[in-house]
Amino acid sequence: MRSLSRRAFFQTGGLAAASAAGAALAPEVAAETPAGSDLTERAAQQRAMLFDSTLCVGCRSCEVACNEDNQLGRAPDAIFQGRPAEDARALAPDVFTYVTFHQLEEDPSSAAFGKVQCMHCIEPACVSSCPVAALHKTPEGPVVWDGSRCLGCRYCMMACPFLVPRFEWESRNPRIRKCDMCWDLQVKGEKPACVAACPTGALKSGTRAELLEEAHQRIAAKPRKYVHHVYGELEAGGTNFLHLAGRPFEELGYRRNLPTRSYREYTRPAMSTIPYVIGGLGLALGTVRWVANRRDEVAHAEPGGDR
Amino acid sequence: MTPRPTTLRMTPALAVLTGLAAVGLGLIAFRFAFGLGAATNLSDGYPWGFWIGMDILAGIALAAGGFVVAGVVHLFGGHRFHALARPAILTAFLGYLLFIFALMVDLGRPWNIWWALISWNHYSPMFEVAWCVMFYTGVLALEFTPALLERLGWERVRRLWFEGVPFFIMALLSLFTFAMTGSAQWTGIVLAILALWETLMRTGVMRRDRQMPVLLIMAGVIFSTLHQSSLGTLFLITDKLGPLWYTPILPALFFLSAVMVGPAMVIVEGLMSARALGRRPEFDLLRPLGRAMPYLLALYLVVRLGDLVLRGAVLEAMRPAFTTAWWWLEIVLVLTALAVFATPELARRGRGLLLGAWATVLAVVVHRCGVAIIGLDVPEYARYVPAWSEVLITAGIAALGVLGFRLAVEFLPIYEDEPAAAAPTAQAVREPAVAPAPVHHRIPVGG
């Protein structure tokens, strides 16, 4: 089901692209929507993070640091209970990041780790979908949430391909909760809390361009150690959080086969037809009305002609 | 104007509706006291569920009778359907009010809804949906106003309304265009088109509708078209929807199904309300609606199946699974409706009309719930099944709607046979669109 529906999703992408080409005629709307390459260029100088799974020992210091810095209110004991998690389900309103644990089949005494948190996409699905721009991509790179305007419609959760945003289901005034890449620390020039806490250097922060280059260098330096893919370089149009791994990413709980186009591209064709619909219907309906009137008048003018 | 004798009595049906509404309102209070998690089975993997499918997607589809009939009567010259226009507009208006109410229950932080007016994100389909809801509800309220003013006998207000509405509509549609595109050029184009028609009508080149400003009806059709299709656009950004439902033409499919279900809803409402109120159904009007149905149903079916073929998803419909069965249910319902409406012996009779119309309505409900509930698949999470409280809240809101319709029919001039019975004029019966006119000799037709 999964693979089939994903494949279908890509195939439909082709059709969507075709209609996008038609919609590109829109003079101002199309010109104003930034092209993917421009955005990627801008993202190159933005803050980003790199996770190297081959260096991660699963100590979960990052989780503890995240919990403290964001005042998520969990006791350290609570963090280390209830193992092991394999995918994004472990994220919660009070869990912004999570180290996933994957026992190796060929060597049960050993394990590999993945990391789940907001990917801070270059052109995020959540930001594109938010009706009131409560979620937005900061110029510095982190994707943050402004609670004062959020409606709680949960469209961001429907849109996010990484299943990241979390909702406070039990609250009377529920918030959308997710990692903000410690935006407050980063604008002060400090590292994100998880990066600062990592004892092995598995987490690193920097600009996206630096980290992307470093990731490719690491792969080139030890080609047999790494999967030759930087997760997040192209996924969902590219993200500000990059991942390296020594094992296939799907084994580490990552969603694979994500499109390389940003998710905004899937709604853009339909959204850019709006002015054509308004203008076209405005002209067509008025014309229809005129024709109908004339037909009536002609019918009434001829005695005996019904209708 | 003398008050009419009331026919409103507490019947068992009315008692059941009141009970459902009361239970629903109680559960809504519970939901606001303890959060969405307490009243629903929604989860982080399935953040949308029964309410989005039924109240919002299906509910809005079923309100489509309003714009289809208003368009046919006031734009396409279908004057003979005039008697159907007011009930259809009333149902649509009530439907939208209920929809907004249901939306407030579903939103986590509904008190922030006003942000949608000032914090614009024209990339978001949800932004388009929010604006369409607000503006179309406003348009429906304006379309419904004459019935209210007639009842109150405020003739001067009615004339002011008639003169002012076109300008209000120009402002509304221009603002809408600007919010959706951020383009002054497009805003100018739309404003120019609307101003053109209004000028033609005021200078007498084109005839005015003396009952209903043409621009108002146009705006209703435009907002409806956008709203119906934008509900489909919503799902284009999610990769959680299965191949039987996900298609880039989802917006077009939603619009087509809305146009198809519009007349069907009018038939259902016409026959059911006639039965409930003890009136004779307007068979001479409902039958021609039924004659249009085969074309609409066939068009929908061709697009729905053709899309599946072009996307190479046909085999998906053969896989034994509950989701597949749901898809087949939709197709079988469309085929049933098509068979009934295409068979003159069946479509002539009230029963046949009702059967075909119900099959159409159910088919659209099944399709929209397929998109919003059944077709969603997030393998990481346990499948979503609606909680009983979700179903009861929806039932309660629907019951409120029926009660509201009953009250409106009681106190406002909705059905034409009633005023006609009070003051029967042959002219009013023959051509109601132009004739019943306390207005028509006062408003200058030409400039």
Image (tube, rainbow, N blue to C red):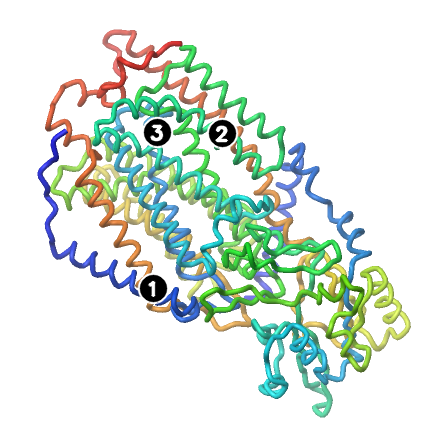
> In the rendered image of this protein, does residue B316 appear above or below residue B138?
below
Callout 1: chain: B
Q: Is mark 1 on a helix, strand or loop?
A: helix
Extreme-bottom residue of the structure: A109
Quadrant housing residue A263: bottom right
The answer to whether the residue labelled 2 contacts the one labelled 1, judged by CB atoms less than 8 Å apart, is: no
Q: Which of the marked residues, 2 or 1, is nearer the chain's N terminus?
A: 1
Quadrant housing residue A123: bottom right
Q: Which one is in front, A104 or B338? A: A104
Type of amino acid under label 1: Ala
If the image is split into quadrants, where does the N terminus of chain B sit? Answer: top left
Neighbour tally class for label 2: few under 14, some 14-19, many 20 plus, Cα within 10 Å: some
Q: What element carries label 2?
A: helix
Q: Where is residue A165 in the image (x, y as percent from the top left)?
A: 58, 65
Disc 3 versus disc 1: nearer the observer: 1
Between marks 2 and 3, how big is the CA–CA gap?
A: 24 Å
* Residue shown at 57% from the left, 43% from the top: A270
Tags 2 and 1 on a common chain: yes
> In the rendered image of this protein, does residue A216 appear above or below residue A123?
below
The answer to whether the residue labelled 3 contacts the one labelled 1, judged by CB atoms less than 8 Å apart, is: no
Q: Name the residue under label 1.
A: B29
Quadrant housing residue B152: top left
Question: Where residue B171 is drawn, which disc sits there?
Answer: 2
Between marks 2 and 1, how big is the CA–CA gap?
A: 38 Å
Between marks 3 and 1, how big is the CA–CA gap?
A: 41 Å
Q: Position of residue A157 (x, y in %)?
A: 55, 61
Q: Position of residue A290 (x, y in %)?
A: 41, 18
Q: Which one is in front, A157 or A191? A: A191
Q: Which of the marked residues, 2 or 3, is nearer the chain's N terminus?
A: 3
Type of amino acid under label 2: Ala
* Residue shown at 35% from the left, 48% from the top: B335
Question: Where residue B72 is drawn, which disc sits there?
Answer: 3
